[in-house]
Amino acid sequence: MDSSLLQATRKSHIEQGELYFWTATINQWQHLLRADEYKDVVIGSLQYLSDAGKVDVFAFVVMPNHIHLIWRTNEPNGKESPQGSFLKYTAHTFRKMLRKEGGDRLQPYIVDAANKDYEFWKRDSLAVPLFTRKVAFQKLKYIHSNPLAEHWQLAKDPCEYKYSSARYYELNEKNFPFLKDLWEVI
């Protein structure tokens, strides 16, 4: 028997060059991403990785406590995976922003770990491979509908929510230069 079949694969495992639906959640479900300046950190990191050719981003939504992406990683960012670089960069930036705000804003993210004092993203993000057009369409619809969910009510129409790729797919408006067309690759 092939021993590789017995090895557990983390739910965050991403094969380079493959298309994935990926979800990263803020630690303890805190609403860190509620303010636009924190959402802008996520957008800026995606733009940087895209410009550097490390990732291709096909769809996204930035919610108050999590993000969803449809993306493909192309190559490592130095010694790190693109998703690792994304999580690390955004976490460092969040820490600086919260420290500058003062008060006890950093308190919910304190961890007792040997390698870090704070944890902003939950460990082991969800990565779902997208092998068919049908599943890709389902995930795209899910991403764009997320701001409309009853418990969020961030918009009445997917195109009203600024931090999403919905306008790109529904109105052909490319408000985020890093976006690529999903239908051209699947």
Image: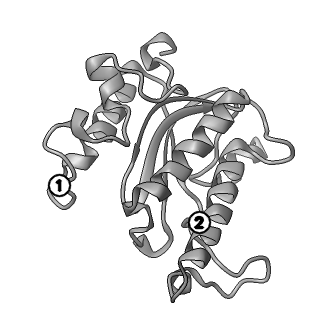
In the shown orientation, is residue 142 left or right of residue 76?
A: left
In the rendered view, tell whether residue 158 sits above or below residue 110.
Answer: above
In the image, what residue type sits under mark 2?
A: Phe
* Colour option used: one colour
Q: Which mark is residue 184?
A: none
Mark 2–mark 1 Cα distance, whole angstroms, equals 25 Å
What residue is at 43 percent from the left and 61 percent from the top? Answer: 33
Which residue is disc 1 drawn over? 153
What residue is at 56 percent from the left and 74 percent from the top? Answer: 98
In the shown orientation, is residue 137 left or right of residue 50?
A: left
Seen from this angle, which residue lies furthest top?
A: 184
What residue is at 51 percent from the left and 88 percent from the top? Answer: 103
Q: Nearer the viewer, residue 108 or 176?
A: 176
Tell which circle, 2 or 1, labels the residue nearer the N-terminal end.
2
Which residue is disc 2 drawn over? 94
Q: Position of residue 36 (x, y in %)?
A: 41, 55
The image quarter containing residue 157 is: top left
Badge 2 element: helix
Q: Position of residue 15 (x, y in %)?
A: 67, 36
In the image, what residue type sits under mark 1?
A: Gln
What residue is at 43 percent from the left and 22 percent from the top? Answer: 132
Q: Nearer the viewer, residue 125 or 85?
A: 85
